[in-house]
């Protein structure tokens, strides 16, 4: 505990790091203020009733940073931006040109790639905003709107989503941590006092075992996430000895290449939820279509997506797939092998070049399998508990807990990195 407070003291003692932390905290406060500015004409009682009975809308509320619970101007949150980022990263697999931009052009290429993601966010936000307004109108949360008013509301919602995206990028660039993840984190944390109050006021002695079980599972999830996130597999690296002249020599030093079990962090969870939520929103909107064939197909799709077994299996599969996908995009064994060879380093017992890349890939694939199965298991565990106990909040709380713990770990690491750089 003393080490924790010592790190806090050192972080705020360093002027640059202190300014970064305060800048990020200030922008998070702005994001929270935006989340309580509602669009006009809503029925609050009807909205709360709808949210309390829909896991789908509660997950959307999670991504909006709590903006959906107030039907605020940022009700879409960072969802469209996350979806656009997913689409762009999927396109890197199919388009060699995009892959070169993302991986081979360095920082300039990543900035260009990020600009494409921002541009794609606009049409996605328009589609999601229109579909969501129609969905709420169908549930009598919003009244029927004239075309002009509907267009204005969509513009406001899209602008709110883009503003939240901009705030997230400002936090990432000038603050500390990943801005998008911190916005979601702030929305989750802001709901904790209300959730705790609800548990206290609705407490019944007969439910004590369920509460104890939930607390025990939450502690196990926190322990497991910390353990898997921090775990790594060191690959030994030896630098070849170089002799210059008759006496001087360099190299011969042994080191290691750390490969983390979970290279992707919380990103696969966010990706999987985005992919699951977006089609469901569209199908729910199309289920009220005047075209009978479209309405019938959409209703069947919604029924399939709301089936707990199908949802849990799909959720698990997406988390595993996205863990592998994101690791493959962000970690290139061929590049690592090339860099090792250029610096005169090699893995003992493995030939330099392609053989080294193949060896790293084999090790990384096995490690990623462990991390992917763990993330998938943690993601669907709350769904299993919800089916067993019938308590709706467990399903939402499990995903939120996973995101919160991962974001805190990532934030602490980045603060430690800043402090280490300052010391050196």
Image (cartoon, rainbow, N blue to C red):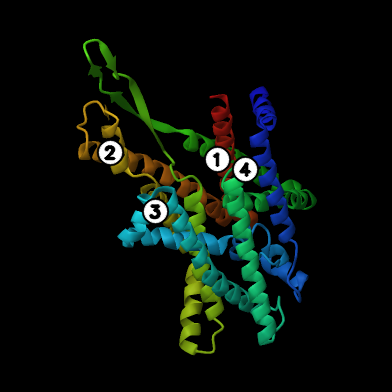
**What distance separates the C-alpha of mark 2 from that of mark 3?**
18 Å
Mark 4 or 2, closer to the camera: 2
Q: Which disc, if any, is residue 410? A: 1
**What distance separates the C-alpha of mark 3 from that of mark 1?**
23 Å
Mark 3 or 4, closer to the camera: 3
Around disc 1, counting alpha carbons within 10 Å, would you say few (fewer than 14), some (14 to 19), or many (20 or more)?
A: some
- Residue 169 screen position, x and y as percent: 58, 53
Residue under label 3, please give it.
102
Q: Secondary structure at mark 1?
A: helix
**What distance separates the C-alpha of mark 4 from that of mark 1?**
28 Å
Q: Residue at x 60, y 40 (%)?
A: 408
Q: Earlier in the sequence, mark 3 or mark 1?
A: 3
Query: Is 240 placed left or right of 9 in the picture?
Result: left
Residue under label 2, please give it.
338
Q: Earlier in the sequence, mark 4 or mark 1?
A: 4
Residue under label 4, please give it.
213
Q: Secondary structure at mark 2?
A: helix
Q: Earlier in the sequence, mark 4 or mark 2?
A: 4
Q: Earlier in the sequence, mark 3 or mark 4?
A: 3
Tell whether label 1 touches label 4 (CB within 8 Å).
Answer: no
Tell whether label 4 touches label 3 (CB within 8 Å).
Answer: no
Q: Residue at x 63, y 52 (%)?
A: 183
Q: Which disc, if any, is residue 418? A: none
- Residue 93 screen position, x and y as percent: 33, 58
Whether residue 288 is visible, yes or no, is: yes
């Amino acid at each position: 505990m003393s080490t924790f407070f010592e790190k806090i003291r050192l972080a705020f003692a360093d002027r640059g790091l202190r300014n970064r932390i305060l800048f990020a905290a200030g922008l998070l406060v702005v994001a929270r203020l935006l989340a309580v500015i509602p669009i006009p004409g809503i029925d609050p009682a009807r909205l709360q009733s709808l949210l309390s009975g829909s896991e789908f809308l509660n997950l959307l509320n999670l991504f909006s940073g709590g903006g959906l619970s107030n039907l605020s101007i940022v009700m879409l949150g960072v969802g469209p931006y996350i979806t656009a980022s997913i689409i762009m990263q999927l396109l890197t697999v199919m388009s060699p040109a995009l892959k070169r931009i993302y991986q081979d052009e360095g920082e300039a290429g990543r900035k260009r790639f990020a600009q494409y993601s921002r541009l794609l966010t606009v049409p996605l936000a328009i589609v999601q905003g229109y579909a969501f307004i129609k969905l709420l109108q169908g549930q009598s949360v919003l009244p029927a709107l004239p075309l002009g008013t509907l267009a204005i509301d969509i513009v406001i919602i899209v602008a709110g989503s883009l503003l939240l995206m901009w705030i997230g990028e400002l936090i990432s660039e000038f603050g500390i941590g990943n801005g998008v993840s911190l916005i979601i984190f702030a929305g989750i944390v802001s709901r904790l006092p209300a959730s705790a109050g609800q548990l206290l006021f609705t407490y019944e002695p007969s439910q004590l075992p369920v509460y104890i079980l939930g607390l025990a599972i939450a502690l196990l999830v926190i322990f497991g996430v910390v353990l898997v996130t921090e775990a790594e597999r060191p690959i030994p690296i030896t630098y070849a000895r170089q002799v210059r002249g008759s006496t001087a020599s360099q190299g011969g030093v042994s080191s290691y290449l750390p490969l983390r079990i979970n290279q992707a962090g919380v990103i696969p969870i966010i990706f999987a939820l985005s992919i699951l939520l977006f089609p469901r929103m569209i199908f729910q909107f199309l289920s009220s279509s005047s075209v009978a064939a479209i309405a019938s197909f959409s209703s069947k799709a919604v029924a399939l997506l709301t089936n707990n077994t199908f949802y849990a299996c799909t959720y698990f599969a997406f988390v595993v797939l996205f863990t592998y996908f994101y690791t493959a995009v962000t970690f290139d064994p061929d590049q690592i092998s090339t860099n090792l060879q250029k610096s005169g380093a090699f893995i003992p017992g493995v030939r330099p070049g392609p053989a080294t890349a193949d060896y790293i890939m084999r090790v990384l694939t096995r490690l990623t399998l462990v991390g992917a199965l763990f993330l998938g298991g943690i993601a669907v565990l709350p769904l299993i508990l919800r089916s067993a106990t019938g308590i709706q909040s467990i399903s939402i709380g499990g995903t939120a807990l996973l995101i919160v713990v991962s974001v805190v770990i990532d934030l602490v690491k980045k603060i430690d990195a800043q402090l280490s750089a300052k010391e050196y």
